[in-house]
Image: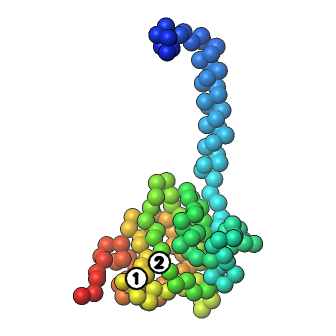
Amino acid sequence: MHILSSGKPMRLTRTTTEIICLLFFCGLFVYLPSAARAENYYVNSVTGNDTGNDGSQAAPWKTITHAVNRASGLDSLYIAPGSYIESIDLRPRPKRALRLLGQGTGGNMPVIQTPNPDSHTIETFDFSGTLQNLAVTGQQMPMESISRVRKKRP
């Protein structure tokens, strides 16, 4: 039973209740598949552009940071071979387990360069996604230590 602003109770008929439930569940079936869909995005340090491109294979983004900030859910980020000098924050956001997948092999693969650990960091605390085929240079600590230890130079 619901109370209207006039103070009089309003009775919902069974048909009205059924219609409301039907509309609610139809809305869920339309919303949930689109919310759970994983997308593929592309990053290329040479041909990419963070301001004008959409992250598609034909119009990749330039930086991993931009791709990470735009991605959600179970999205995959395909990183083209090249150098990426940037700070990357991979700490989890609600309902997000990204996959960062480097393209290329051997000497022709993506390299994340962090020449100064005091100003360029890769934050991985509680990251539950995937990092695959990515090289990291300039680190003074092993990658698995970054999430546990934050040392500053005196």
How far apart, in angstroms, are the residues tagged by discs 2 and 1? 8 Å
Q: Amino acid at mark 1?
A: Ser
Residue found at the very far bottom of the displayed protein: 107
Rendered location of residue 141, percent (x, y): 35, 84
The percent coordinates of residue 136 (x first, y second) are 48, 84
| Of callouts 2 and 1, the N-terminal one | 2
Q: Residue at x 30, y 76 (%)?
A: 149
Q: To which residue does mark 2 refer? A: 87
Q: Above or below — where is 29 with respect to 10?
A: below
Q: Nearer the viewer, residue 67 or 37?
A: 67
User: Which quadrant is home to the C terminus?
Assistant: bottom left
- Mark 2: few, some, or many residues within 10 Å (few <14, many ≥20)? some
User: Is residue 154 visible from the viewing direction of this image?
Assistant: yes
Residue 14, percent from left and from top: 60, 12
Query: Which dot marks residue 130?
Result: none
* Category of crowding for the residue at label 1, using alpha-carbon neighbours closer than 10 angstroms: few (below 14), some (14–19), many (at least 20): few
Task: Residue 106 in the image: state x and y as whole percent.
Answer: 60, 89
Tag 2–tag 1 contact (CB < 8 Å): yes
Image-quadrant location for residue 38: bottom right
Residue 2 visible, this angle: no
In the image, what residue occupies the spot 57% across and 87% down?
83
What kind of element bears circle 2?
loop
Give me the residue at 64% from left, 60% from top. Answer: 39
Please give the residue where the numbered disc 1 appears in the rendered image.
119
Is 88 on the left-hand or right-hand side of 70?
left
Give the secondary structure at mark 1.
loop
Circle 2: residue type: Ser
Q: Nearer the viewer, residue 145 or 30?
A: 30
Say which residue appears at 44% left-offset and 89% top-offset. Answer: 115
For this rendering, which residue is in front, 39 or 151? 151
